[in-house]
Image (tube, rainbow, N blue to C red):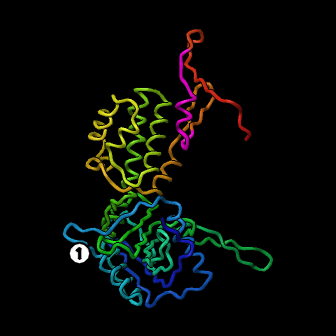
Amino acid sequence: MINLYPTQIESLSIHRIGNKSKNEGIFFSSEPYRLNDEISAILKEYFFKPFREKEENYFRFDNEVDVEFNELYKIVSEIFNDTSSLHANSKKIATHLFDQSNHPHIKSGELYVTHLTDVMMDNQKVDAVGIFKSELKHDFLQFAENEANLDILIQQGVNINKLDKGCIVFNINKEDGYKVLSVDSNRYDTKYWLENFLGVDVLTDENFFTKKYLKFCQDFAKDVVLPAEDKKQEVMFMNRAVNHFAKNDDFEETSFLNEVIDNPDLIPEFKHYKVEKGPKYSIEDVSNFPIANKAVSEARKKIKNVINLDTNIQIKMDFINPESAEKFVEKGWDEEKQMYYYLVYFNKEQKS
């Protein structure tokens, strides 16, 4: 888990990157930008807001031969080794980005390279390198007094409420290619940013596997449990699945299946579904891994535990106490009304 609120921008270099295929050039600033408190506060919100609103799906620098051959990995490592080299190395980063900007669709823009301190990652302070790019320009109005009237001036600038592209490289796990977070608001050129420029691959750690396996279970519940049984059992399956993850430090698939799947006939269905759909989630060969508690908490918030009925009634199941739904909610069929019903037992109504 990361916390960027206490993070400080220690240094900042800004360059302009053109589109190489359009014979646009590259502009290097001769020295680092001189920050003040007002600019720092605005830039921190501009740079960091997308990362606070986005799931923490980590990447790592990669290369088919060795990570040492990844251009950005080498440059970032030089910055971490000597932070005073940031401006000189920011020009190398700008040149590397310019070399990848050779498709007509890629937009020119400003590149910001920063050294960040006091980044909180899993309650530990680390430093980081931030690389951000602004591309889209927006019209905005300025006003000037002209004797007795106000004149309207139309100007163009960067919308500081929406970062176009960015990545943060955390100074941790260097031997494995660091831990990297990336955002890209303009998805028409994702390959250019993630693959060509950053050269990253998904970091398959416990956070990744926990998220992917729970998402796989959610789709299994929808595609298999619901058609085979009913909505209640779909909800209860995910209820048991999430609680199994929440109370264990490590995942072991056989134990999971025996505890979570009530109907033994669904166990071979689960295994078949994993063979068929597993590659989509990158879990086809995964049956053991450490469980990331934060990923479980995030998944619990997203999983629907409500049965919506066509009579405009909702029944909400409790994910914390799933035994209540098992004991006190029954489904049946009323011959006279030719309708299904849920029978709910209780002693007294709770006050809101």
Mark 1 = which residue? 69
Q: Which residues are magenta?
A: 318-333
Element at label 1: helix
Q: Is residue 292 left or right of residue 151?
A: left
Q: Residue at x 33, y 80 (%)?
A: 77
Left or right position of 246 against 193: right
Which of the 4 quarters of the picture holds residue 169?
A: bottom left
Q: Indicate whether residue 329 is drawn in magenta.
A: yes
Mark 1: amino acid: Phe
Question: Measured from the top left, where is residue 339 in percent x and y?
Answer: 56, 16
User: Does the image show residue 156?
Assistant: no
- Residue ID at (74%, 78%): 145
**Can you give x and y, in whole percent of width and height, for residue 29 in the image?**
44, 87
Where residue 270 appears, as percent x and y from the top left, is 33, 36
Residue 130 in sight here: yes
Residue plotted at (78% across, 80% down): 147
Q: Residue furthest left?
A: 65
In the rendered view, does 149 fall on the left or right side of 36? right
Q: Nearer the viewer, residue 28 or 199?
A: 199
* Residue 45 vertical placement versus 260 (above, below): below
Image quadrant holding the C terminus, namely top right
Query: Alpha-carbon neighbours of circle 1 within 10 Å: few (<14), some, or many (≥20)?
Result: few
Report if residue 104 lies within the magenta region: no
Query: Within the image, what quadrant is residue 208 found in?
Result: bottom left
